Structures are given as C-alpha cells and as structure tokens.
Image (spheres, rainbow, N blue to C red):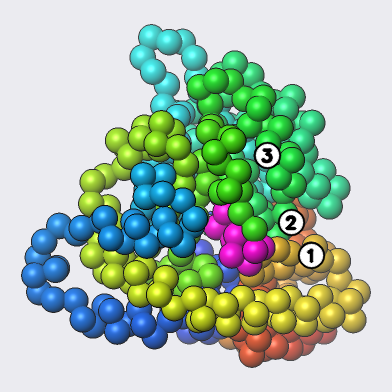
Amino acid sequence: MTELKSHYEKPAEMYDGLRLHQNENTDGCSPRVLEALARLTREQIGFYPPYSAVTEDAARYLGVSAERVALVNGLDEGIMGAAIAYLRPSAGSGVVPEAIVPEPAFEIFRFDTAVAGGRLVQVMPKPDFEFALDEVLAAITPATRLVFITNPNNPTGVPVPFDAIRTVAKRVPRNAIVFVDEAYAEFAGRSFIPELPAFPNVLVGRTFSKAFGLAAIRIGALVGAPEILDPIRYVVPVYSVNIGAVVALQAALSDLDYLNAYLRQVDESKALLYAACDRLKLKYWNSDANFVLVRIGDRVGEVIEAAQARGIFLRNRSSEPGCAGCLRMGTGVVEHTKRGIAVLEEALCAAQ
Ligand SMILES: Cc1ncc(COP(=O)(O)O)c(C=O)c1O
C-alpha cells in the first residue's frame, strides 16, 4: 500500500511556460469554439441552459443514442458522481462499498472513493504495467461496487485489453459497475462503447478536455445504459454544465478536422520522444495517449526543476505506484514536443 494523501493537490498554477505536465492540448481549442462563445446572447446567459441538442450532438459523435449519454462538468464530475452513487454506504446495511483501483491510476479515483465513504482496494502494478487481471479478479468481493479502469491508462499511456474489461465485467457482483475511463480514447483510436450493449454494467467516461482542447470549459460525458446512468444523474447537481460549455462542445464537435490534425501531431510527437529516449538510453512505455511516461531515475526531481527553470513544465510521477523515478511529458503539438525534448536533454546534462 502506498501512503495515501487525503485529498487531491492541484499542481501549482503555472501558466508562464510550456505546459507539458497536464496532458492538455497545448494548441488550445478549435477557433470555432471562440466564435461560438462570442455569439452567446445576454438571454442565453440569463436562462438555465438547454441540453437536448448538445446531448444529441455528443451522442452522434460517440455512436450511441442520446438517452445513453449524460453530459457532466468535466469527467471529474462524472467520476465523483459515480463514486457517490455507487460507493456511499447505505444506512443500516453494514456493508462498506468497495472500489477497486488498478494502480498506477488517475489519483482522483482514490480521493473520490474516500469522499463518498467507500473503501479503496488498490491493486499493485505488474512489470511494465501489464493489466493485473488475475489480481483485480482476486480483489473482487461481495462488497465490490465499482472497478475503475482507465484505458489507455494515465500516467502510463498503456492500453488495457478489452478482454480484461469483459472478464472483470462478468465477474463483479450484480449491483456493481465497471467504470472505464476513456479520457484519452481519441488518441488510442478505439473505445469500449460499441461493446456496451453486451455489457450493461459497464459505464464509459469521456472528456472533451484533452483531444478537443476544452479543459478550461469543463465538459465530459458518461456513456452507458440508463439503468446505471440514472443513479449518477440523481447525485450530480442539476444544470452543472453551463451554457458556455454547451455551445463550445457543439462547435468543437462540428470541427473534427481540427481534432484529427491534433491527433496526427500526437503520433508524430510520440515518435520523436521515443527516438530521443532511445538516444538518451531512457526507459519509456509506448503510449496510446497524448503523453509518455519516462523513467529518469534518481535525478528525476532535479531534471524537472531544471526544465522548469527553462520554462517547460513536466510532471513528476515518482510517488505513484510502480513509477519511481518517472516523469510524464505531454506529446501533443510537434513544435512543443521538440522544445520539451531539447530541454529534457539539456536538463539531463545539467543534472549530471
Ligand atoms: C484518466 C483521467 N480521467 C479524467 C480526467 C479529468 O478530465 P476532465 O478535465 O474532463 O475533468 C483526467 C484528466 O487529467 C484523466 O487523466
């Protein structure tokens, strides 16, 4: 067990440099999003927002019908909603609901489990972050209510085989769900969503923060059968998605050329970083996301500080299970990746 922090510590507010530490689209959103925001009227801002049209648009993009989509104020809100809906102990039952989290994982799962009053069951990583299927299955108990699986995973970028998700979904108790966090699915080019009709206890979480560059707008989606979505709808605040997010998402979804151009850059960026790591003899993991986990070793802290002094922010992931000595670097806009690599090389020399 790793020593658990009691709450999420937001990274410091660093905007005066190149942000390669939060997996954002460092190019920003489609220009159509700004145009849509500029077209908002005073009345639109004065009224509670309508959701039907944007939910239809999101459903079309995700390839499902609208009743299978719940828009949320960032996927973070969807994760919190799922934790409250499925992990809140019910009075008098004597059961403390359990959440299984295969590590290393997005830290929010741990904190939201604690906030909801559930019990965290961590499954420790296997070599090279191969999905620990047997260990996850062994962690399932009659009290299991949620299994969080991120595909591709953050912070590793490593994909989870669909077969593992299917097996877990078949083995959890009848009143449990498997939450597949697909925050980075666009980069992987595959999604569990087409499998959902066969696996009605699986909920997929998506965000428009990353590939679509809408992180500051806060918009995400939960996708699944109405029976498992409804308990979450009931605990998420009504009208939590604001009108800016509504029009921004519609505009972003109307510009898939912009998305695809970014996805191409991500592939090119990852190839550049892999080549640099090979040159520098650094261990890394092939990533299906828009970032790469790189093992620097004992000097990781110094390297990150040296990069920061040169205006490039990288994320230290050393304290995450299995990630000792590792940093995570965003690999989006090619020009930005080149700057990141140059600084990494310099910082490695400086830290020697
Ligand atoms: C795995 C994972 N899930 C969810 C989120 C949160 O997404 P959002 O910005 O939509 O809240 C992130 C953001 O870093 C993430 O990495």
Question: Tag 3 or tag 1, which sits nearer the N-term?
Answer: 3
Q: Tell me which amino acid carries mark 3.
A: Ile
Q: In which quarter of the image is the C terminus?
A: bottom right
Q: Name the residue under label 1.
A: 286
Whether residue 348 is visible: no
Badge 3 element: helix
Which stretch is magenta? 181-189
Quarter of the rendering containing residue 317? bottom right
Crowd tier of the residue under label 1, counting other residues whose Cα lies within 10 Å: few below 14, some 14–19, many 20 or above = some
Give left or right: position of 290 versus 238. Answer: right
Query: Residue 23 at what x, y percent from top left?
Result: 57, 68
Label 2 – label 1 distance at C-alpha = 7 Å
Query: Is the CB–ligand 1 distance for label 2 below 8 Å?
Result: no
Give left or right: position of 239 versus 284. Answer: left
Label 3 – label 2 distance at C-alpha = 14 Å
Query: Residue 14 at what x, y percent from top left?
Result: 48, 75
Badge 2 element: loop
Label 1 – label 3 distance at C-alpha = 20 Å
Q: Name the residue under label 2.
A: 158
